Amino acid sequence: MITLKQSLAAQEAAEAALAASSHSAPSHSSRAVADKLQIEGNGGRFWVLPWSQFVGLDYEEKTGGEELVLRFTGYEVVVRGWRLARLRPEVVAGRLELLRSQPHAEMAALKGSDPVVSRIRVFVLGRPVRTESEAETS
């Protein structure tokens, strides 16, 4: 039979492992000059978009987080998470080279001061409008 003390120790170890994995795979990375933005979305999907086709960005605080919309020629990238406004200088300067959604983003958002990405959706412009569930599964 597991004692309460053993159960709490196991739970603390699991939370520490989760926090360590969140730090080992940050939501973003930058370099002095990035010519492409690699996007790693939910479910193993990824995209690579050239900064030369960047058109603009929108930022909005939402209930339960923030939303950052990056517009490229032919694509719209919708990023949800926390502290996303801190990515603006990297986007404006074309230094952002990687955006990835983090598993257990809510937990990571409680710790640290870095931006945390909980969800990324990429839409191809000019295609018929899809519902959110269709966008996540296609």
Image (tube, helix red, strand yellow):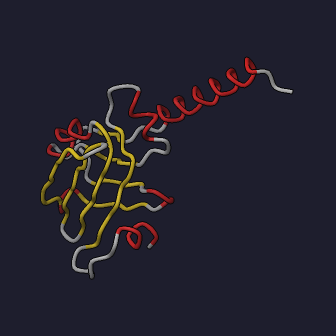
Where residue 118 appears, x then y in whole percent? 39, 47
Nearest the eye: 71 or 104: 104
Which residue is located at x 58 percent, y 26 percent?
A: 16
Nearest the eye: 47 or 103: 103
Which residue is located at x 62 percent, y 23 percent?
A: 12
Considering only vertical position in the picture, is 100 above or below 75? above
**Residue 126 placement: quadrant:** bottom left
The reply, left or right, for residue 61 in relation to residue 16 is left
Which residue is located at x 58 percent, y 29 percent?
A: 15
Q: How many marks?
A: 0
Considering only vertical position in the picture, is 102 above or below 23? below
Where residue 107 appears, x then y in whole percent? 46, 34
Nearest the eye: 84 or 33: 84
Which residue is located at x 13 percent, y 60 percent?
A: 55
The residue furthest bottom is 128
The reply, left or right, for residue 69 in relation to residue 100 is left
Where residue 48 appears, x then y in whole percent? 34, 60
Q: In the rendered view of the protein, which quadrant contains the C terminus?
A: bottom left
The residue furthest top is 5
**Residue 13 placement: quadrant:** top right
**Residue 11 placement: quadrant:** top right
Q: In the rendered view of the protein, which quadrant contains the N terminus?
A: top right
The residue furthest right is 1
Nearest the eye: 104 or 45: 104
